[in-house]
Amino acid sequence: MNTKESRTESLVYAYKNGLYVNLTSQCPTACTFCIKFSWKHQYRSHNLKLTHEPSVAEVLEAAGNVSCYQEVVFCGYGESTYRMTEMRELSDAFRQKGIGRVRLNTVGLGDLINKRHIAPELGSFLDSVCISLNTADPQQYIELHRPLPAFRDKAFESVQNFIRECVTHVPETVVTATDLPGVDIEAVQRMAASLGAQFRLRPYLDNYESM
Ligand code: SF4
């Protein structure tokens, strides 16, 4: 295992053609497959362990010149829908800098987090939402995602409603499943289709990589 680590926190990081924004360390779940603990909050030589919740100005300063990126993605080691206002402001700012596409990667519990239906608002500033569903089985959903007590009872139903509403309001909605042992991937694919969303299988990352 390569454990090359960075000590300086990264509010943004580049991956392929995208600029990824690490906006929060808050999570409604403690997913069994989450790499942040086994990778010590590192991701491809970036330290994603935040010392505080960054401001819009701090993220923009960290991003600098974004002209080389095709896409901005809200995706760190936390759930960005805890910070709806900052996401919207950053999306607007990045578009003014010429970014043509903005995406959110989410665990899909933003309605419960914000205590309201957020898909219409997301649709006003995002091009794409990728929702980490991972299973079509309610019991396995709880086992895999380990929602915090405040979310546990309503999580599976809420994420499905959220997917349906994103399909209505956001130009592109993709349900993802991590390739985990014991998961009926075809059932997740069928559930995604029944909710009107696209589907993508993601590889299970269990070994630390650095580039
Ligand atoms: S929502 Fe994402 S960051 Fe949070 S525990 Fe799950 S995989 Fe990790």
Image (cartoon, rainbow, N blue to C red):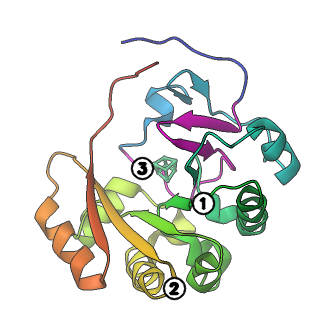
Residue ID at (73%, 56%): 94
Q: Where's residue 210, x and y in %?
A: 46, 19
The residue type indicated by label 3 comes to Cys
Residue ID at (34%, 66%): 175
The disc placed on residue 61 is none
Query: Around disc 1, counting alpha carbons within 10 Å, would you say few (fewer than 14), some (14 to 19), or many (20 or more)?
Result: few
* Side of 116 where 182 appears, left or right: left
Residue ID at (26%, 67%): 139
The residue type indicated by label 2 comes to His
Between residue 52 and residue 151, name the one nearer to us: 52
Is 54 a magenta residue? no
Q: Where's residue 22, x and y in %?
A: 65, 44
Q: Earlier in the sequence, mark 1 or mark 3?
A: 3
Of circles 3 and 2, the one toward us is 2
Q: For disc 3, does the CB lie below 8 Å from ligand 1?
A: yes
Start-end of magenta stretch: 10-32
Q: For disc 2, does the CB lie below 8 Å from ligand 1?
A: no
Q: CA distance from mark 1 to mark 3?
A: 31 Å
Q: Are dots 3 and 2 in contact, CB under 8 Å?
A: no
Q: Earlier in the sequence, mark 3 or mark 2?
A: 3
Q: CA distance from mark 3 to mark 2?
A: 27 Å
Between residue 14 and residue 99, name the one nearer to us: 99
The disc placed on residue 169 is 2
- Residue linked to disc 3: 31
SS at circle 1? loop
- Residue linked to disc 1: 100
Residue ID at (75%, 59%): 90
